[in-house]
Image (cartoon, rainbow, N blue to C red):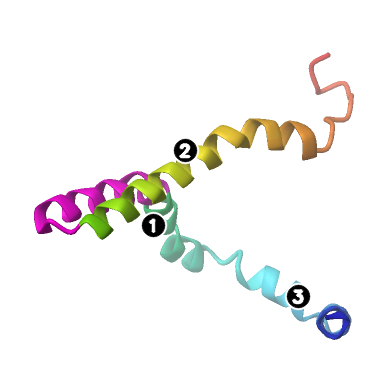
């Protein structure tokens, strides 16, 4: 539906011309906010490992085949995502510009 694209374009135009996007950017660089949000880095790093294992373990303990199956499906999706990442980055990433700082 083209109407959603038009709404998104107009909303982007309003946010950028009003300066809201720059104010939002500056407010997210505050040291207090950064220290409050940094635990998300650790949680985000552990969640892909712990979630499937927890679901599989809970499914085994409770004898619930559906929970166990969901754990295996989540784990399989994560493995597929990680294994396809190098090819995706190679195809879609912008080439590194050759400068005096970049290795040749």
What secondary structure is marked by label 3? Answer: helix
| Mark 3 residue crowding within 10 angstroms, few (<14) / some (14–19) / many (20+) | some
Q: What is the x, y in percent for residue 21?
A: 76, 75
Name the residue that disc number 1 marks.
Answer: 39
Location of residue 26 (image quadrant): bottom right
Name the residue that disc number 2 marks.
Answer: 79
Q: Is residue 88 above or below residue 50?
A: above
Identify the image quadrant of the N terminus: bottom right
Q: Is residue 87 above or below residue 27?
A: above
Q: In the figure, is residue 43 to the left or right of 9?
A: left
Residue range corresponding to the magenta coloring? 45-64
Q: In the figure, is residue 102 to the left or right of 37?
A: right
Q: In the figure, is residue 70 to the left or right of 6?
A: left
* Cβ atoms under marks 2 and 1 closer than 8 Å: no
| Mark 1 residue crowding within 10 angstroms, few (<14) / some (14–19) / many (20+) | few
Specify whether residue 56 is painted magenta: yes
Mark 2 → mark 3, Cα distance in angstroms: 35 Å
**Residue at the image point whose x is 69% and y is 69% from the top:** 25
Q: Residue furthest front?
A: 65
> Mainly helix, strand or loop, the magenta region?
helix
Lower sequence index among marks 2 and 1: 1
What secondary structure is marked by label 2? Answer: helix
Mark 3 → mark 1, Cα distance in angstroms: 25 Å
Q: What is the x, y in percent for residue 47?
A: 36, 51
The numbered mark at residue 21 is: 3
Lower sequence index among marks 3 and 1: 3
């Amino acid at each position: 539906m083209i109407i959603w694209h038009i709404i998104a374009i107009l909303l982007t135009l309003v946010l950028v011309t009003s300066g809201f996007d720059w104010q939002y950017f500056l407010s997210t660089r505050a040291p207090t906010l950064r220290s409050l949000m940094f635990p998300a880095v650790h949680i985000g790093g552990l969640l892909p490992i712990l979630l499937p294992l927890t679901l599989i373990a809970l499914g085994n303990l409770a004898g619930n085949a559906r929970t166990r199956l969901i754990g295996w499906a989540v784990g399989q999706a994560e493995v597929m995502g990680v294994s396809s990442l190098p090819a995706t980055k190679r195809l879609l990433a912008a080439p590194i510009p050759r400068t005096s700082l970049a290795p040749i």
